[in-house]
Amino acid sequence: MTDPARARPRENPTPEGVNPPAVRSPKLVQGIGFAFFRRKAMRNWIKRYGRIFEINVPIFGRSVVVSDPALVRAVCTASTEQLMNVQPNLGNWFGPGSTFGLDDTRHRDRRRLLAPAFHGQSIKNYEKLIVDETLRESANWPEDKEFRMLDSMNRITLNVILRTIFGADGSEGEIEQLSEIVPPYMKLGQLVAFLPTPPFPTGRHSPWGRLEELRKAFDRIVCTLIARAEADPSLAGRNDVLAFLLRNRHDEGTGMAPQDLYDELLTLICAGHETTASALGWAFERLRRHPSVLAELVSEVDEGGSAFRRATILEVLRVRTVIDVAGRRVRAPNFDLGEWRIPRNHTVLVRIADLHENPEIFPHPERFDPYRFHGSKAAAPTWLAFGGGARRCVGADFAIAEMDVVLRTVLKNFRIQTDAAADEKSYFRGIAHTPKLGGRVVLNRRT
Ligand code: HEM
């Protein structure tokens, strides 16, 4: 329960609204709590101040943290004149041409350009590819021996996104090279994504120097792939994302500048694979410990159904939130949020994980219970795994479809051994939250 004595608003009321209560501990303590013990710190702050409060932390500065559903809805539906994307954001890492780095008209245009590649029929076209990649990776899985599912899921989702984006035919060599470059790029990038680039040379062995080298190698390979696609006489009939983007550019005449295209392709690859792999890692981590859910999923797969699997995916994304925060920056002189007033240049952080763990929305939130979503929808502002509003995840439908096909393929071909192992803790890689031990499982082949 919120302690009412401590949850009083700050002392500087304005005529129309008051600033949210500010966390009182020193900035350094708040920064350490936010960076290294976020879940615990947030729980304590919610208990003490309520579901809206202000923290002051390195990188994001004065930030209002929100996890009340009505206030979250107001953040998600605010206009871009009121709230812009959080600063700094992943555009720092992927480049200024990335969706993450865009706002206003450029952001809307980019979303319009990307939408057809990640919807409906397009996703159906990728299904066979996802099955093939899952079978290819699982061919070498050991039996009766514990191993890390997360590593396999990372390989599957990386191969899937690379082939979804570039198409597989005739580009195997380049795709192979990209699959070597992307993992170290992701690992380093997550470490420094939100840090300012040092204003002095850091040398090629520093994280920034190494990132720059990897980025150059990425651009070189992608340049070859784009040139090949542009020269392809069958471009009009191709289903890959690059073909969509090039065709739209040609049709509308106002498509992406070359550097924007490079930045966006990198964005889709990086944003699109590790997030989905982490969610899949958590799915296996949960199933190992929930025999009745697993048994029901297996019978459903055998009967050709999918509704319970879909509910399970939504519940995994709730109970083990992969991206725990969606951020915005106040652009208007003030942003009025319910009874609260937030000044310009403040950050607004929607705490997705705390929404998902709110017992008033999800009774016994710690329980893994796919029945919560069986036959019912998971929607904003209470279920927010993919964020909300104009910046909701571009790849949400794609990610759910990919998780669905991977789970179905694994359950069809393998029996997962269940036991009472302790839950895996969460490990924060800088952007995504993953199972700390890698979602370890023991499997047998089904005959
Ligand atoms: C389980 C997997 C995934 C999760 C949990 C996830 C989660 C998120 C979240 C929370 C956001 C921020 C939304 C906001 O600010 O309101 C986001 C944005 C984004 N995601 Fe995902 N994502 C996933 C998979 C994907 C995939 C597969 C792709 C692409 C293929 C993708 C591409 C993007 C892009 C481009 C944005 C930026 C959207 C914008 O700023 O307009 N994500 N995602």
Image (cartoon, rainbow, N blue to C red):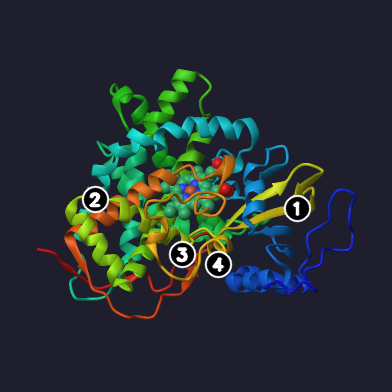
On the image, the x and y values in percent for residue 47 come to 67, 72
Q: Nearer the viewer, residue 420 or 193?
A: 420
Q: Secondary structure at mark 4?
A: loop
Q: Nearer the viewer, mark 1 or mark 2?
A: 2
Look at 75% across and 53% down and name the residue there.
346
Where does residue 108 sit, x and y in percent of width and height? Answer: 58, 32
Asked whether the residues under the numbered discs 3 and 4 touch, taking CB atoms below 8 Å apart as contact, a structural biologist would say: no
Query: Disc 3 designates what residue?
Result: 319
Label 3 neighbourhood size at 10 Å, few (<14), some (14-19), many (20+)? many
Q: Please give left or right for residue 123 compared with residue 345 in the image.
A: left
Residue linked to disc 1: 346
**Amino acid residing under circle 4:** Pro
Identify residue for label 2: 305
The amino acid beneath tag 1 is: His
Q: Secondary structure at mark 3?
A: helix
Q: CA distance from mark 2 to mark 4?
A: 30 Å
Q: Is residue 19 left or right of residue 82?
A: right
Q: Could you tell me if residue 349 is visible in this image?
A: yes
Task: Give the x, y percent position of residue 356.
Answer: 53, 61
Report how far apart the C-alphas of labels 3 and 4 lie in the structure.
12 Å
